[in-house]
Every structure is written in structure tokens, then in C-alpha cells.
Image (tube, helix red, strand yellow):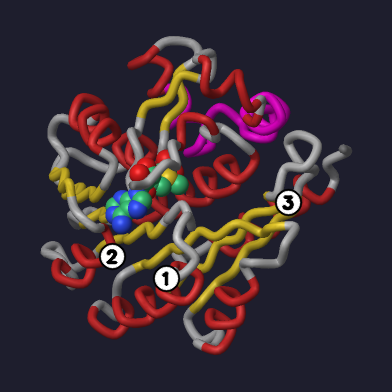
Amino acid sequence: MLSYQHAYHAGNAADVHKHAMLALALDYMARKPKPLTYFETHAGRALYDLAGPEARKTGEAEAGLARMERWFAPDHPYARALAEARAQGGASAYPGSPLVARALLRADDRIVLAERHPQEVAALREALPLAEIHDADGPSLALSLTPPDPRRGFLLVDPSYEVKSEWSAIPELVANIRRKWPVGVLMLWYPLLASGAHRELTAKLAAMGPEGVARSEVRFPPARAGHRMIGSGLWLANPPWGWEEAARALETRFAALKP
Ligand code: SAM
């Protein structure tokens, strides 16, 4: 049984990195007047409450978004997604990746989401009533539904890495999907851990080669003493124009963070 719940971690420094770079990519892709498919293998519940007991228990959003929101001007796509979530859920609402996508995509774009935790699936259905939501194993679903229709599109793979085998299975998954859907923009998120457990995954990504791929890694002070996550990484196939430059600018912000 899976125990990970993103409500404890929503709005943390890794979410700021992942969601800001996701928002920039989708904003750019939505400028072309052609519908697209947005697909997620590990969707979570989409709408989070940063004043709720889970977020307050870990203090991760306090160490993350609360310190970092000033980095984003009101017209930045991430700031626009934050504003839309707050309009929907109140001042302490936070948009998970499906709501970041909903905020930046158009009505005729297709949103397909997989999530395994029954509680999260129920919340997801409430937050995005018009999306195609599957109570299913995200990686298997992505392999069976790609290439999607419309073929133009974006896939986010954002596992919780609760199962040790994911460190090797997830890079293999993105390699397989890339073969099936060479024009898809594929984004994979991974944590940087004090233990170095992520190195198996990063070595496999490096072995896949740099052609057509952008990477972004940031480090940040641990949210609390002993916190294992010390950074966040993104691997992106077919990066939209301007994404890498924006990534370098955000990396500079993270590098200047004081403990
Ligand atoms: N992408 C979300 C966001 O940025 O807002 C956060 C997702 S969270 C890191 C990972 C989610 O994957 C959890 O909600 C967990 O229940 C779900 N999950 C774990 N294994 C899964 C699987 N095999 N298929 C689909 N969802 C899974």
C-alpha cells in the first residue's frame, strides 16, 4: 500500500522548481493555436491547502513557496496558476501540477491524469471535473496511451520514489515513451537526496544522451534538520523554446538562497 501523500510536501522548494518550469513550458506550448494533450502519470490531488495540518506539520511550504513567491512577477505563468488556484480554493490554496496545467491550457486541450491513491483520485475528480482521470498505474497507462491524440503534447512523470525499483524503472519508462512518441515533450522530476540514492536514476538519464534534452537541477537548504531531500531535478525531452534560459535564471535564484 502506498503511503506517500503530497499534501505534506505541496509548495515545498522542489514544487516551486517543478511547477514554475512546468508552467513556463505549457504557457509556451499553448501559444500555438493547435490543441494538445497533457498527460500525467502521478497526478496527486491537484488542490492543496497550505494552511492545513499536513503542510503545517512539515513546514515545507514555509521553507519553499513562502520564501520564493517573490521571485515571480504577477504575469509569470506560475504566478498566474497560483492566482487561479487561490480564486478557486481561497488564499491558502496551492495548485498541484494538474491545476497548473488547467490554468495554462485551453478548453479544447485534452487533460489525461493517472493516480493510484483512492483518496487522491476522489479529490482530483472534484478539482478537475472535465479531465480524463484514471484510477490506474500511471506508467502502464502512459505506455498504452502514447502517442496520444492530439499527438502534440506534454507528459509529466512525477513519481514519489517510494519503491526502490523506481530509480531504474522510471528512466526506462521515459526512454520507452520517447521511442513511441518522439515529438512529445516529456518532463521527468526526481529528488536529489542526501543519501545519493538518486544517482542510479541520473546515471541512466545521462546514458540516454543529451540530444534533444534539457536538464535543470537546483539545491536548497533542508526544510528541517535531517530532511533527506536537498535538491530537485528535471529532465526534459524536446524542450520548448526559451525553457533552458529560464531554467538557468531560476537556478541562479536557488543558488543564492541562504540557509
Ligand atoms: N504531480 C503532483 C504535483 O506536482 O502536484 C504530485 C504527485 S506526488 C509526487 C506522486 C503521486 O503519485 C502520489 O499522489 C501517489 O499516490 C501517486 N502514485 C504512486 N504510485 C503511482 C502509480 N503507480 N500510478 C499512479 N499514481 C501513483
The Cα–Cα distance between marks 3 and 1, rounded to whole angstroms, is: 20 Å
Dots 3, 1 in contact, CB < 8 A: no
Count of all numbered marks drawn on residues in the image: 3
Question: Disc 3 on helix, strand or loop?
Answer: strand
Q: Is mark 2 within 8 Å of ligand 1?
A: yes
Q: Is residue 41 left or right of residue 19?
A: left
x then y, percent, for residue 169: 41, 74
Q: Is residue 74 magenta?
A: yes
Q: Is residue 174 above or below residue 150?
A: below
Majority SS type along the magenta span: helix
Residue under pointer 2: 139
Residue under pointer 1: 170
Q: Does the residue labelled 3 lie within 8 Å of ligand 1?
A: no
Residue range of the region highlighted in magenta in the rendering: 61-83
The Cα–Cα distance between marks 1 and 2, rounded to whole angstroms, is: 8 Å
The Cα–Cα distance between marks 2 and 3, rounded to whole angstroms, is: 26 Å
Residue under pointer 3: 230
Question: Disc 2 on helix, strand or loop?
Answer: helix
Circle nearer the N terminus (2, 3): 2
